[in-house]
Image: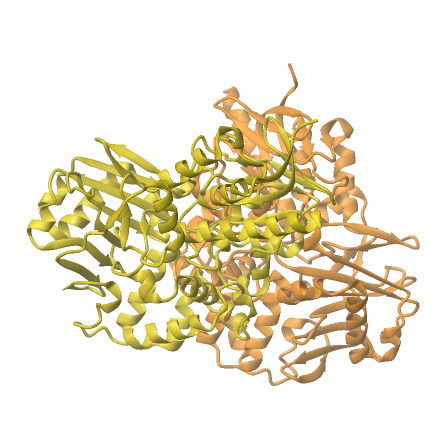
Chain colours: A orange, B yellow
Amino acid sequence: MTTLYDVIVVGGGLAGLNAAYEFKKSGLNVLVLEARDRFGGRTESIKVDEYWFDLGGQWMGGTHKYLKQLCDELGVKSFPQYDEGKHVLEINGKKVYYSGNISTLNKGYDLEGLNETIQKIDELASELNPEAPHAHQKSREYDHLTVSEWLDRNTKGIDAKSIINWFCRVCVAAEPSEVSFLYFLHFIRTAGSYSLLADIHGGAQQDRLIGGSQQISEGLAKKLGSSSFALNSPVRAISQDANQCSVRTDLTTYRAKYVVVAIPPTLAGRIDYKPPMPAKRDELTQRMPMGSVIKTIVIYDEPFWRKEGYSAEAISDQGPIFICYDDSSHDDKKTAIVGFIAASAAKDWAEKSPEERKQAVLECYARWWGPKALKPRYFLEKSWKEEEYSRGCYVGYTSPGILGQCGEALRKPVGRIHWAGTETASAWVGYMEGALESGFRVSKEIKQRLTNSKL
Amino acid sequence: MTTLYDVIVVGGGLAGLNAAYEFKKSGLNVLVLEARDRFGGRTESIKVDEYWFDLGGQWMGGTHKYLKQLCDELGVKSFPQYDEGKHVLEINGKKVYYSGNISTLNKGYDLEGLNETIQKIDELASELNPEAPHAHQKSREYDHLTVSEWLDRNTKGIDAKSIINWFCRVCVAAEPSEVSFLYFLHFIRTAGSYSLLADIHGGAQQDRLIGGSQQISEGLAKKLGSSSFALNSPVRAISQDANQCSVRTDLTTYRAKYVVVAIPPTLAGRIDYKPPMPAKRDELTQRMPMGSVIKTIVIYDEPFWRKEGYSAEAISDQGPIFICYDDSSHDDKKTAIVGFIAASAAKDWAEKSPEERKQAVLECYARWWGPKALKPRYFLEKSWKEEEYSRGCYVGYTSPGILGQCGEALRKPVGRIHWAGTETASAWVGYMEGALESGFRVSKEIKQRLTNSKL
C-alpha cells in the first residue's frame, strides 16, 4: 500500500510551497508535486557573472508583509529599487520628465482627467470585498464592461485614458479591451489602491531581493526536505471519493486525504478530474487565461543613464518597452535595465526573431537615454507564453462575464480539492505576496478540516 | 510493433467522423478515438416512446449542403420545421405576435432601429474572409469591442439593441458583453447573413431529421467499421517528431503519420503535447470557452398550442426560455416543444433544482399559450456545461482580443497535428454543417501531405 499523505500539493511555486511549509510545521505528512525541474513557478532567477537577475516575479512591495516575513526567516536581504533622477513619460506623442512615484506624476503636468479617474477607480475598488468580488451588488454590471469601455463612458480626458490603458497593460499584462472592469477593480482592491500598484516608494516596486526571488521557493523546499517533494512530476489526473484522493503523474499514483491545486486556473483546467469538476469551476478554468508579457534585462558595462541624471524608469504607450527600471545589483557592480513588453504587443513581438526584439528594445532605450544604450554586454529575455507550465504571466485574468458569475469557484473547494495560487488571493492578486497569502489561507482551510475530522 | 496508422482522429463527433470517412474512402488506414461511450459529440438523440428527440444539434438549414448530402447518402429523411400560426415576440416588456421568419418580424412592428442595425451588421460581416477573419484590415478594431459595446456605439434603437442582444444569446450562447464583435461578425459571415441564422424558411432552422441527428454520426461510424474506432478512449497526450505522432489514451499508445484533433479548442488545450504547442495556439485554447446552454424538451399529449393558432415559436428577452419551437415528430404523433435557456441565464438556472427549472419552463409556456402547458407528459433537459467531454454548447466563442491576434491558430497545423471541429469551419461555424465542412477541409489538407510525401 502506498503512503496516504495528509496533503498533496500540486505546484511548487510560492503558493504551493508556502502551504506545504505550513502543513509541515503542523506535523502533517505533505508531498509537493512540481511539473518542472525547478521550484519557483513564475519566479525564476538566472546568474550572470555571479549576480542574480530575475526573469519572473521580482519586487517586494512596501505592504508585502508575508514576503517580508519569509525573507527574514530565510535570511534573504532586500534593497531599495533605484529611482534617483528623471523618469521618462512618453504618452500621446508627448515626452516629459517626472520624478518620484508614478501615482504623483500628474502633479507637475497637465494630464487631463487623470486625478479624477484614479480617484473614481480607487473609490469603486474600495467598495469590493477582496474575498468575494462577485458579492458586490454591482458586480455583474461592472463585469459586463471592459476596462476600455468603462473609460470611454467615464472619462473624457485623453491622458487619463492613455495612462489607465497603459496601467492595465503593464499591471495585468492584457489589453484594457480584454479585461473585465470588475476584474480590474478586484486586482486594484486586493493590492489596496492604484498608487500601491504603480509606485516604488511604499508601492509594489519598492524593494528588490539580493540573490533573486527564486531563492524564496528554494529556501521553502529546503525546509520541507527532499522526501516532501518530487520535481519533473506534472500531475495528469486527480480522482477523489468520500475518503481520499488519488493524484496521478506520468509514472506514479499518489494518495492523500486532501489535495491543494496551486497552479493557475487555466493550467488547473488541464488536469483530468474524477468526478469531473462542477460546471462553474470548469467554466472558470476555461475563461481565466494568462496575461502576455516578455521580460527583458539589458546588462550594461556602466550605468550611463545615471550619469546623465536619468533613473532608467520610463513609462511609454509607444513601446516596445512599456515600463522599465534600473535593474542594477545592490552593490551597483552589475548595472542593468529591466523592461517589459506587455499585453498584445508581447504576442506580436514574440513572433519576431530574438535579434529583432533585442534591437527594438535597445533602440527604445537609445530613444530615451542616448546611443550608449545600443551597446549592451548581455541581453536576457523571457517570453512567458512559451513556458509550458505557466503559459503566460504575470497572472490569470478574466474578460467580461466570468468573475461576476463564477468568481466563487476561484476558491470554493470541490470535495477534497482546495485551490491556491496568486489568482485566488485576497491580498495582492498577481504578486508573490498574493501567492504566499493564498498558501496561508489554503493551509488553514485544510488544517481545519483535518481537525474537524478528528473530533 | 504497433500499427502505424495514416491518420488518427481525436473526437468522434461529426467533424472527426466525416474526416475519417474521407480518409477511409481514399484507402487510408484511419483510427478514430472517442472519449465518450457514444458517437456524435454535441449531437445526442434520445428515444421516448419510439420517437427520437435531440438533446443537442438538431436542425438542417436551407443551405446546409454537406449535411443534406450526407443525409441522402445515409438514407436519413428530413421534414420541415413546423411554424404555422402566430409566433410570440416578448421584448422590452411588450408582447406582440408575428408570423413567418424572424428576420422579417420587423415588418409589422415598429422595432426601433432594427432594420438598419441588421443591415449594418450584415454589411460588415460580408467584408470578412470566412477563412481568415483576422486578415481584415479592421479585424483588431472589431476584436477590441464586445457586441454590446458595438451596439451602444452604433445604434440608438432600444428594440434593435434588445433583438441583437437576444440573437447573440440564442445563437452564440454567450452574453453580448462576453462576445468579441469580430467573432460575432465571423459567426454571421460563415453562415451567410443574420437572416440565414435567424430563420426557418431558407435559414438554419428549416428542417429536422426523422430519427434524430445522432444517427448521422452513427451512420458514419458504421461505414468506418469497428476496426477503425475506439470508444471510451479519451486522448491524454500527443507527441510528435519529424516522422510520426504518438497518441496516448489511458490504456494504449497509438502511432500515426498525422493526427486530426476534432474537438473544441478548450478541450484540445487539455491534451498534453510534446513538443508543447506554440504560444498562439496555446493562447487560443486558453481563450475560446464554450457557450452556456440548457436545452429543454417538453412532451405533451396533444399540441394544444396549434389548436389555438400558435406555432410554439417564441422569442423572449425575459426567459427562462429565450427561444422555442414546435418539436413534434414528423407524423405529429408525438407532440412537443423544444426551448433553450441560453448564456448567463443558463449558468444561473443550472444552479437550481431540476424541479425548479421544469416548473419555470412550464410557467413560461403557460404565460404564452395557457395553462395546458403546465401538464406535460415528459420533461427532458440537458445542461451541456455538465457534459465532461463538451463542457458547454453550442460552440467555442471568443471574448475580445483573441480572434484578431491568434485567429490563424484555429486551423494552422502544428507539425503533424491538424485541427477540425465546427469552431474551425469557414461555413456555418457552430453548426453540424460547420463540423462536416471542417472534416472535408482537414481531410484534404492531410491527403495532400500524404501525396506530397510520396512524390
Q: In the picture shown, does residue B268 fall above or below A380?
A: above
Quadrant of residue B251 in the image? top right
Number of numbered discs overlaid on the protein picture: 0
User: Outermost residue toward the left?
Assistant: B308
Position of residue B439 measured from the top left corner of the image (x, y, whole percent)? 50, 49
Q: In the picture shown, does residue B141 fall above or below B229?
A: below
> In the visual, does A202 lie left or right of A192?
right
Position of residue B223 measured from the top left corner of the image (x, y, whole percent)? 45, 36
Residue B239 visible, this orientation: yes
Quadrant of residue A101 in the image? bottom right
**Near-viewer residue (A359 or B5):** B5
Position of residue A104 measured from the top left corner of the image (x, y, whole percent)? 64, 75
Q: In the picture shown, does residue A63 fall above or below B209?
A: below
Specify the quadrant that holds the N terminus of chain B: top right
User: Outermost residue toward the top?
Assistant: A1
**Near-viewer residue (A205 or B302):** B302
> In the visual, does A292 lie left or right of A304?
left
**Near-viewer residue (B24 or A164):** B24
Which residue is painted at 73% across and 65% down in the image? Answer: A352
Quadrant of residue A447 in the image? top right
Residue B351 visible, this orientation: no
Which residue is painted at 38% across and 58% down in the image? Answer: B175
Q: In the picture shown, does residue B284 fall above or below A321?
A: above
Position of residue A40 measured from the top left corner of the image (x, y, whole percent)? 73, 44
